[in-house]
Image (cartoon, rainbow, N blue to C red):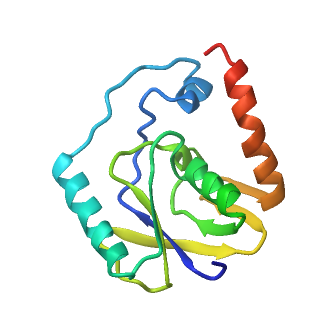
Amino acid sequence: KSGDAVFLVGATDADFAGSQIEKLIDKDIAHTKRRIDLNTEYARGMNLRQMFVDREIKMIAPLGRGGVAIKLAQLASHHNIGVDASFDFDGQLLFSETASRYIVIAPSGTKIKDAVEVGTLTEDTFVLNTKTDTIEKSVSELRQLWEGAIPQWIKSVD
Protein backbone atom coordinates (compact mmCIF):
# COMPACT_ATOMS: atom_id res chain seq x y z
CA LYS A 1 0.00 0.00 0.00
CA SER A 2 1.04 3.59 -0.48
CA GLY A 3 3.58 4.68 2.14
CA ASP A 4 5.24 1.28 2.56
CA ALA A 5 9.00 1.19 2.05
CA VAL A 6 10.85 -0.39 -0.86
CA PHE A 7 14.06 -2.27 -0.04
CA LEU A 8 16.76 -3.59 -2.35
CA VAL A 9 18.36 -6.74 -0.92
CA GLY A 10 21.83 -7.69 -2.15
CA ALA A 11 24.68 -5.95 -3.95
CA THR A 12 24.32 -4.63 -7.49
CA ASP A 13 27.14 -5.20 -9.98
CA ALA A 14 27.43 -4.76 -13.76
CA ASP A 15 26.00 -8.21 -14.55
CA PHE A 16 23.83 -8.31 -17.64
CA ALA A 17 24.04 -12.09 -18.29
CA GLY A 18 23.19 -12.19 -21.97
CA SER A 19 20.13 -9.98 -21.78
CA GLN A 20 18.43 -7.67 -24.26
CA ILE A 21 19.85 -4.67 -22.37
CA GLU A 22 23.35 -6.03 -23.07
CA LYS A 23 22.44 -6.21 -26.76
CA LEU A 24 21.14 -2.65 -26.66
CA ILE A 25 24.26 -1.28 -24.93
CA ASP A 26 26.99 -3.42 -26.54
CA LYS A 27 25.22 -4.35 -29.82
CA ASP A 28 25.93 -8.01 -29.00
CA ILE A 29 25.00 -10.66 -26.44
CA ALA A 30 28.11 -12.19 -24.89
CA HIS A 31 26.26 -15.18 -23.38
CA THR A 32 28.27 -14.94 -20.18
CA LYS A 33 27.50 -17.29 -17.33
CA ARG A 34 25.83 -15.80 -14.26
CA ARG A 35 27.88 -15.77 -11.11
CA ILE A 36 25.82 -17.16 -8.26
CA ASP A 37 26.77 -18.15 -4.74
CA LEU A 38 24.26 -20.86 -3.85
CA ASN A 39 24.96 -20.54 -0.12
CA THR A 40 24.13 -16.81 -0.23
CA GLU A 41 21.08 -17.47 -2.41
CA TYR A 42 19.74 -20.12 -0.03
CA ALA A 43 20.45 -18.19 3.19
CA ARG A 44 19.00 -14.95 1.83
CA GLY A 45 15.91 -16.67 0.44
CA MET A 46 15.23 -18.56 3.68
CA ASN A 47 15.71 -15.42 5.78
CA LEU A 48 13.26 -13.44 3.64
CA ARG A 49 10.82 -16.33 3.60
CA GLN A 50 10.81 -16.47 7.40
CA MET A 51 10.35 -12.70 7.65
CA PHE A 52 7.36 -13.01 5.30
CA VAL A 53 5.86 -15.89 7.31
CA ASP A 54 6.35 -13.82 10.48
CA ARG A 55 4.60 -10.88 8.72
CA GLU A 56 7.60 -8.59 9.15
CA ILE A 57 7.64 -7.95 5.40
CA LYS A 58 4.68 -7.67 3.02
CA MET A 59 6.10 -8.80 -0.31
CA ILE A 60 9.23 -10.41 -1.76
CA ALA A 61 10.09 -10.22 -5.46
CA PRO A 62 13.26 -11.88 -6.77
CA LEU A 63 15.20 -9.90 -9.36
CA GLY A 64 16.13 -11.49 -12.65
CA ARG A 65 15.91 -10.44 -16.29
CA GLY A 66 15.84 -6.70 -16.63
CA GLY A 67 16.90 -6.02 -13.04
CA VAL A 68 15.43 -3.51 -10.60
CA ALA A 69 13.82 -1.21 -13.19
CA ILE A 70 11.89 -3.99 -14.90
CA LYS A 71 10.80 -5.69 -11.66
CA LEU A 72 9.56 -2.41 -10.14
CA ALA A 73 7.74 -1.53 -13.38
CA GLN A 74 6.13 -4.97 -13.39
CA LEU A 75 5.03 -4.66 -9.75
CA ALA A 76 3.72 -1.10 -10.24
CA SER A 77 1.73 -2.15 -13.32
CA HIS A 78 0.36 -5.31 -11.77
CA HIS A 79 -0.60 -3.77 -8.41
CA ASN A 80 -1.54 -0.34 -9.81
CA ILE A 81 0.73 1.48 -7.36
CA GLY A 82 3.51 4.01 -7.78
CA VAL A 83 7.12 3.90 -6.65
CA ASP A 84 9.50 6.69 -5.68
CA ALA A 85 13.00 5.26 -5.28
CA SER A 86 16.61 6.46 -5.40
CA PHE A 87 19.67 4.32 -6.02
CA ASP A 88 23.32 5.06 -5.27
CA PHE A 89 24.59 3.82 -8.63
CA ASP A 90 24.59 4.76 -12.33
CA GLY A 91 21.42 4.38 -14.38
CA GLN A 92 22.50 1.39 -16.45
CA LEU A 93 22.72 -0.66 -13.23
CA LEU A 94 18.95 -0.38 -12.87
CA PHE A 95 18.98 -3.19 -15.45
CA SER A 96 21.72 -5.28 -13.80
CA GLU A 97 20.92 -8.96 -13.42
CA THR A 98 23.22 -9.69 -10.47
CA ALA A 99 22.07 -12.90 -8.78
CA SER A 100 20.61 -13.24 -5.28
CA ARG A 101 18.85 -9.88 -5.20
CA TYR A 102 15.30 -9.09 -4.17
CA ILE A 103 12.85 -6.23 -3.96
CA VAL A 104 11.08 -6.29 -0.59
CA ILE A 105 8.09 -4.22 0.52
CA ALA A 106 7.90 -3.64 4.28
CA PRO A 107 7.29 -0.91 6.84
CA SER A 108 9.97 1.79 6.79
CA GLY A 109 12.85 1.04 9.12
CA THR A 110 12.44 -2.74 9.01
CA LYS A 111 15.80 -4.44 9.63
CA ILE A 112 16.51 -6.75 6.69
CA LYS A 113 19.91 -8.39 6.32
CA ASP A 114 21.91 -7.07 3.32
CA ALA A 115 19.14 -4.59 2.43
CA VAL A 116 19.02 -0.87 1.70
CA GLU A 117 15.80 1.11 1.97
CA VAL A 118 15.59 2.80 -1.44
CA GLY A 119 12.15 4.39 -1.51
CA THR A 120 8.43 4.23 -0.90
CA LEU A 121 5.26 3.12 -2.63
CA THR A 122 3.16 6.03 -3.86
CA GLU A 123 -0.32 6.54 -5.28
CA ASP A 124 0.20 7.15 -8.99
CA THR A 125 3.74 8.11 -10.00
CA PHE A 126 6.69 5.88 -10.89
CA VAL A 127 10.05 7.58 -10.29
CA LEU A 128 13.47 5.92 -10.23
CA ASN A 129 16.48 8.17 -9.57
CA THR A 130 20.13 7.15 -9.98
CA LYS A 131 23.42 9.06 -9.97
CA THR A 132 23.08 9.61 -13.73
CA ASP A 133 19.47 9.13 -14.79
CA THR A 134 15.83 9.52 -13.80
CA ILE A 135 12.89 7.49 -15.05
CA GLU A 136 9.52 9.15 -14.43
CA LYS A 137 6.12 7.95 -15.63
CA SER A 138 2.56 7.91 -14.38
CA VAL A 139 1.38 4.45 -13.33
CA SER A 140 -1.29 4.50 -16.06
CA GLU A 141 1.34 5.29 -18.72
CA LEU A 142 3.62 2.60 -17.29
CA ARG A 143 0.79 0.06 -17.42
CA GLN A 144 0.14 0.87 -21.10
CA LEU A 145 3.85 0.42 -21.87
CA TRP A 146 3.98 -2.83 -19.92
CA GLU A 147 0.89 -4.29 -21.58
CA GLY A 148 2.15 -3.19 -25.01
CA ALA A 149 5.51 -4.89 -24.46
CA ILE A 150 4.11 -8.43 -24.74
CA PRO A 151 2.74 -8.06 -28.31
CA GLN A 152 6.01 -6.34 -29.31
CA TRP A 153 8.06 -9.16 -27.81
CA ILE A 154 5.99 -11.77 -29.65
CA LYS A 155 6.69 -10.01 -32.98
CA SER A 156 10.43 -9.74 -32.21
CA VAL A 157 12.92 -11.87 -34.16
CA ASP A 158 15.71 -11.70 -31.54
Look at 40% across and 47% down and name the residue there: 13
- Indicate left or right for 50 with 156 as reference: left
The quadrant in which residue 82 appears is: bottom right
The residue lying at 25 percent from left, 53 percent from top is 41
| Picture quarter with the C terminus | top right
Q: Position of residue 128 (x, y in %)?
A: 65, 60
Picture quarter containing residue 24?
top right
- Residue 77's x, y, as percent? 70, 56
Coordinates of residue 114 in the picture (x, y in percent): 31, 68
Q: Residue furthest left?
A: 39
Q: Determine whether 24 is above or below 7 in the image.
A: above
- 43 horizontally vs 49: left or right: left
Going by the image, does 45 lie left or right of 9? left
Q: Is residue 3 above or below residue 124?
A: below
Residue 138 in view in this figure: no
| Residue positioned 63% across, 82% down in the render | 3
The single residue placed furthest to the top in the displayed view is: 157
Quadrant location of the N terminus in the rendered image: bottom right
> For residue 101, what is the image quadrant?
bottom left
Q: Residue at x 76, y 58 (%)?
A: 136
Classify 107 as above or below 132: below
How many numbered discs sit on the rendered protein? 0
Q: Where does residue 151 sit, x and y in percent of width and height?
A: 74, 29
- Residue 82: tell me if it is visible: yes
Q: Nearer the viewer, residue 50 or 64?
A: 50
